[in-house]
Image (cartoon, grey):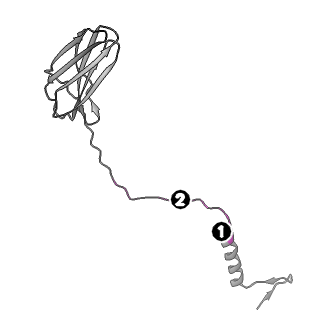
Amino acid sequence: MSRHRAGGTTRLPRRLRFLAKLLVAVVVLTLVPTVAQAAFSNREAGSTVLGTYNIPTPTGVDASYTCSTSSRRSATVTVRDFTAVARATGYTVTLTAPDRKVQTVELAASKRATTLSVASTTSGKYVLSVRANVGSWTGKDPAVFSFTC
């Protein structure tokens, strides 16, 4: 089955040469690291809705205050009502003393009355603020009232 050449060397049959080349190719491709490549063609569009809402300032705040002039100065504010803000989920009412001590009350949207008290080490200006909330967002401009005790 072998054929001889003029130089005296033996030639392998064609089929055997093909199998040898195939074996070498498989071994080389197995041992050589390959580059991973992937492509994805399924595309899906997402939808995003974006809007803005300026949270209005509460108006029509009906409140009164009393001052304590004892050795411990304090002020008490009673908020009886204020105008509801459209879309509000709640309200933040804050009373700040002259020495920057603060009392804050969170109200549900359906409740618009509360009482706050804060003591101070000094006499001076107290500040009451009422701010509307919509979800986790807080209104930019509160209704602000100040008085001196």
Amino acid type at image mark 1: Thr
> With respect to residue 24, does 16 lie above or below?
below
Q: Position of residue 32 (x, y in %)?
A: 67, 63
- Residue 148 appears at what percent x and percent y? 24, 8
Q: Residue at x 73, y 85 (%)?
A: 13
* Disc 2 target residue: 37
Q: Where in the figure is residue 74, as x and y percent of width and height? A: 27, 14
At label 2, counting other C-alpha atoms closer than 10 Å, the crowd grade (few under 14, some 14-19, many 20 or more) is: few
User: In the image, 21: left or right of 72?
Assistant: right
Residue 114, magenta (yes or no): no
Q: Mark 1 sits on what residue?
A: 30
Secondary element at image label 2: loop
Q: Quadrant of residue 149?
A: top left
For the N terminus, which image quadrant? bottom right
Residue at the outermost right position: 8
Count of marks, rendered view: 2
Residue type, label 2: Gln
| Residue placed most toward the observer, 90 or 78 | 78
* Helix, strand or loop status at disc 1: helix
Q: Return the x and y of residue 88 as percentages of the image width and height.
A: 20, 33
Q: In this rendered view, identify the residue nearer to me: 145 or 76.
A: 76
Give the vertical position of 84 relative to 9 (above or below).
Answer: above
The boundaries of the magenta stretch are 27-44
Task: Tell which of 145 and 118 is nearer to you.
Answer: 118
- Residue 121, by quadrant, is top left
